[in-house]
Amino acid sequence: MFSQSYLFLYLLVVIAFIAKNNSLLIAIVFLLCMKIIGLDAKAFSYIQSKGINWGVTIITIAVLVPIATGDIGFKDLSSTFKSPFAWIALISGVLVALLAKGGITLLAEDPQITTALVLGTIFAVSVFNGVAVGPLIGAGIAYIAIKAMEWIK
């Protein structure tokens, strides 16, 4: 109960609680429960390999709900191209999706980067009242920065 992984998770629980980051708190408590009941050996590698894809799927479902409910329709789609702000949003959406793609690549190639991303997110949420949008965008930005540094060398 007092291994390094438990202590690290307990520390993150305290930080998540102080930062009022419910998503992180739920995730850590879930992982702790899995460890305590002994499901970690079988489940963690599966969750690690499939979890990002599950998360992306859930986020995609949430984004598509307004279309499914009829709140967004073809009329809204056609009016999108008439506003310069909508074009900015459209381009931003494309860039964010491409950043997230790079983030998935980085997290798959270098999983320990997740620790720095989580700590950076917790820091921004707790100190600057930021919003935790997940590690994919942060990883995507890191991926672009790392590739730029490699290109410069």
Image (cartoon, rainbow, N blue to C red):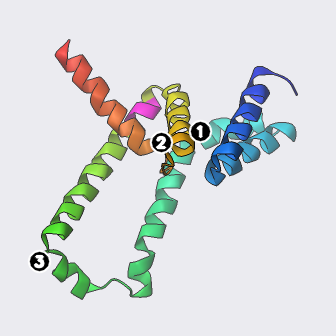
- Residue 49 image-quadrant placement: top right
**Element under label 3?**
loop
Residue underneath mark 1: 48
Contact between marks 3 and 2 (CB within 8 A): the answer is: no
Residue type for callout 3: Lys
Residue 97 position in % (x across, y down): 31, 52
Q: Of discs 2 and 1, which sits in the foreground?
A: 2
Residue underneath mark 3: 82
Residue at image position (54%, 40%) is 127
**Element under label 1?**
helix
Spatial distance from mark 2 to mark 1, Cα to Cα? 14 Å
Residue underneath mark 2: 135
Residue type for callout 2: Pro
Residue at image position (39%, 44%) is 137
Residue 116 on the magenta segment? no
Magenta part, dominant SS: helix
Contact between marks 3 and 1 (CB within 8 A): the answer is: no
Give above or below for 153 relative to 1.
above
Q: What's drawn in magenta, residue-wise?
A: 104-108
How many other residues sit within 10 Å of disc 3, few (<14), some (14-19) or many (≥20)? few
Q: Of discs 3 and 1, which sits in the foreground?
A: 3
Q: Is residue 40 left or right of residue 71?
A: right
